[in-house]
Amino acid sequence: MADSAQRLRHVEHVMGTVFSFDVRGDTGPRTRTALAAATAWLHHVDEEFSPYRPGSQVSRLARGELTADGCSPEVREVLRLCADAEHRSGGWFSARYAGGLDPTGLVKGWAVERVAAMLHSAGAPDVCVNGGGDVQLHGGPWRVGVADPLRPGAVVTVVETRQTLAVATSGPAERGCHILDPHTGAPPADPLASVTVVCRALGDADAWATAACAMGAERAHGWLEGLPGVDAFTVTPDGGTWQTAGFARLKGRYISLCGSGDRRRVY
């Protein structure tokens, strides 16, 4: 564990949630400059992508006041990533529901991935950025505790890593049933209490966790097992759990964690 002189922590409230930064090993001027740039960029992302801001590019695009070609490079990039995720998931991930446009199922993960890379590129060897419970990691060692969706304050599993890794969880535990089957507009017939996806890039992990929730348990388990470079852990409404064959290599020793039930704890 790095001492306080080699550790930089910061919390930023943006995009309707909390982003926490934990940097170990290099807290010098380059790192601090990168952290300031990262937090400023997150506010810029919120201004461009928020579906709750009438003047955001996403809102204007949804109303037909703006074309994709007229959007910023960041918005065009996310629209491309959403289209790619929709194709790769067989339509189970979608940024369009009932004729509307909402790319938030991918934006937060993409943004966390980007700011973590900014800090790592500035020379910080060990970086953790947690955006509303979805985590991008570089270096380590890091241990990520995944909350039990059925027991507030409890941890259901722990992911351990010393390399670049992303951990994203989707499910109805915190926001209710907000992920729908994009083919029907209804909740899945066999819902999952939570899906945690682990891979290198958080934009992908975020999209795959959302798609798996939309599929429901039967489809999701086979699909997740077949995704290259991806591992996953799911919890069913009756408390049952399932994991991909490769998840065991990431699974850390379970320990008791103190605190008030954040969706993800990193230590």
Image: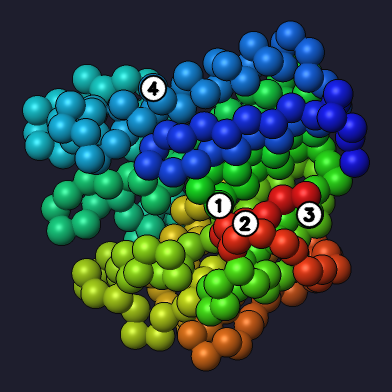
Kind of residue at disc 4: His
Residue designated by label 3: 143
Residue at image position (67%, 55%) is 265
Q: Residue furthest front?
A: 259
Which is in the foreground here, disc 4 or disc 2? Answer: 2
- The earlier-in-sequence mark between 2 and 1 is 1
Colour scheme: rainbow
Q: Residues within 10 Å of mark 2 (few under 14, many from 20)?
A: many
- The earlier-in-sequence mark between 3 and 1 is 1
Q: Is residue 158 left or right of residue 260?
A: right
- The earlier-in-sequence mark between 4 and 3 is 4
Q: Secondary structure at mark 3?
A: strand
Q: Which mark is residue 44?
A: 4
Residue at image position (48%, 63%) is 170
- The earlier-in-sequence mark between 4 and 2 is 4
Residue 92 in view here = no
**Distance between mark 4 and mark 3 Cα atoms:** 30 Å
Q: Do the residues under discs 4 and 3 have CB atoms within 8 angstroms?
A: no
**Residue 145 coordinates in the image, percent (x, y):** 70, 61
Q: Which mark is residue 264?
A: 2
Q: Is residue 146 left or right of residue 246?
A: left
**Residue 238 coordinates in the image, percent (x, y):** 52, 90
Residue at image position (78%, 24%) is 124
Q: Which mark is residue 133?
A: 1
Q: Name above or below for residue 37 compared with residue 129.
A: above
Q: Quadrant of residue 71?
A: top left
Q: Secondary structure at mark 4?
A: helix
Q: Do the residues under discs 2 and 1 have CB atoms within 8 angstroms?
A: yes
**Residue 243 coordinates in the image, percent (x, y):** 67, 76
Q: Residues within 10 Å of mark 1 (few under 14, many from 20)?
A: many
Q: Secondary structure at mark 1?
A: loop
